[in-house]
Amino acid sequence: MNQKRIFNSQSRRDFVKKSSLLAGGAIAAPLLSRANFFSGADDTIKIALIGCGGRGTGAAVQALSTKQNVQLVAMADAFKNRLDDSYKNIIEALEDKKGRVQVKEEHKFVGFDAYKKAIALADVVILTTPPGFRPIHFEEAVNQSKQIFMEKPVATDPAGIARVLAAAEKAKAKKLNVVVGLQRRYQSSYRELIKRVHDGMIGDIVSAQAWWNNDGVWVHPRQPGWTEMEYQMRNWYYFVWLCGDHITEQHIHNLDVINWALEAYPVKAQGMGGREVRKGKDYGQIFDHHFVEFHYGNGTILNSQCRHQKGTMSKVDEMLTGTKGKVFCDEARITDTKGNTIYQFDKSKENQPYQNEHDELFEAIAKGEYKFWDAERGAKSTMTSILGRMATYSGQTIEWDKAINSGLNIQPSTYDFSAAPPVLPDADGLYPVAVPGVTKYF
Ligand SMILES: NC(=O)c1ccc[n+]([C@@H]2O[C@H](COP(=O)([O-])OP(=O)(O)OC[C@H]3O[C@@H](n4cnc5c(N)ncnc54)[C@H](O)[C@@H]3O)[C@@H](O)[C@H]2O)c1
């Protein structure tokens, strides 16, 4: 349908009526930031990119590749070189759609406060910094009444989760669409599998398994002239306040699939982990393996493993066992208890979930629909991964309620390149690493 027609054919009153029905009848707030958005005078949807790294660049290209009239108008990053590279890469990737990048020099913002200025210029914001900053950026975007795409994880500590949950409530009240980049939720095969689980095809789920085992990720060694804060920001993967450890940063995807299938979150967890091969000063403080037993309220146990060790078995997958069958997610297959296939998703029909997240979000926004409220479940799946980390770091059984209400806050008190980050190296350049049995929670 022609975009202009959509705007003309739906009055603001119609939209407000519709969105309040969708959201359970609460008092509806204006959906979009500009009063003329529904007038049909201008169908441009302006976006701002906050965190111009690998994923942010990809997400911006995907947003700009939707059917809607989307323009990138502002960018923000802690570092100018990252912003400049991203700007160049977005233009190159878009090829024939160059008019979609309209970022004036004065709308390229750098530094810790850059996000506020970029958010102010947009209708939709893409939040793709390291996850330690997500609660602050999400809160600001909600306060400024923006539509939001934010990457997972959405925090790195329980205090951050509490902030995101509070902002998620506000976003709901304001009818702001929020998509979280747990892209399996936007992937056709997963949607078909989980729909069948919810329809009872495998009966009651009794156990589950989840894996994120592979070689690990990049390292950015310290460069002369960097302050300690700059070093940690650039090598963010290896610092818990920024990354959450790899159980949070990557394994969240698999944990979220199990939460989705069970329509529940664990009540407690216990596990083990450590760093066996990834040692040394370039690797900060995170573990290289975690194995966690998550217990759900209905008695289901999820055995979860994640490992970053070169030369070991690679597997990124989930499996569910029910009273009537099993789901093998990577194979997109469901069997009965004897192993006979009772459902097979046709993988030639798989979609591109990263693109689909944006296709669905921008279609809803253009139509003036309130359709996505992923923030709460994104926060609770992030919390699942943090619960696992608390269990492996401490070596204790950790209860969900205690953990989420712990108020544990591992962020710096000041964001400044000359300020001290929350962890510092010793005289040999090594960082404190959790010791199970000694470390409390974190
Ligand atoms: N859904 C997925 O499959 C997927 C894949 C990759 C990454 N991600 C997520 O995307 C996020 C970013 O990951 P990435 O791989 O793009 O990392 P990256 O290092 O390539 O990019 C992060 C960018 O954020 C910038 N940044 C850091 N702190 C900032 C701040 N306070 N304000 C503004 N900018 C800041 C960095 O300078 C950098 O340019 C992470 O949360 C990651 O988990 C998700």
Image: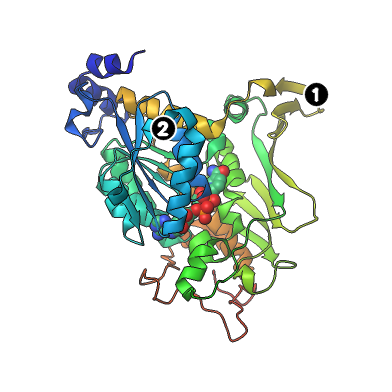
- Is label 2 in a helix, a strand or a loop? helix
Q: Nearer the viewer, residue 85 or 253?
A: 85
In the image, what residue type sits under mark 1?
Asn
Q: What residue appears at the point 32 percent right and 18 percent down from the top-left corner?
A: 3
Q: Is residue 170 left or right of residue 202?
A: left
Q: Is residue 410 left or right of residue 189?
A: left
User: Is residue 235 placed above or below 260 in the rendered structure?
Assistant: below
Q: Where does label 1 land, which residue?
A: 340
In the image, what residue type sits under mark 2?
Lys
Q: Is residue 151 visible?
A: no
User: Is residue 18 placed above or below 392 in the rendered structure?
Assistant: above
Q: What residue appears at the point 50 percent right and 75 percent down from the top-left corner?
A: 423
Q: Nearer the viewer, residue 402 or 331?
A: 331
Q: Where does label 2 land, which residue?
A: 98
Q: Nearer the viewer, residue 214 or 115?
A: 115
- Residue extending farthest to the bottom is 427
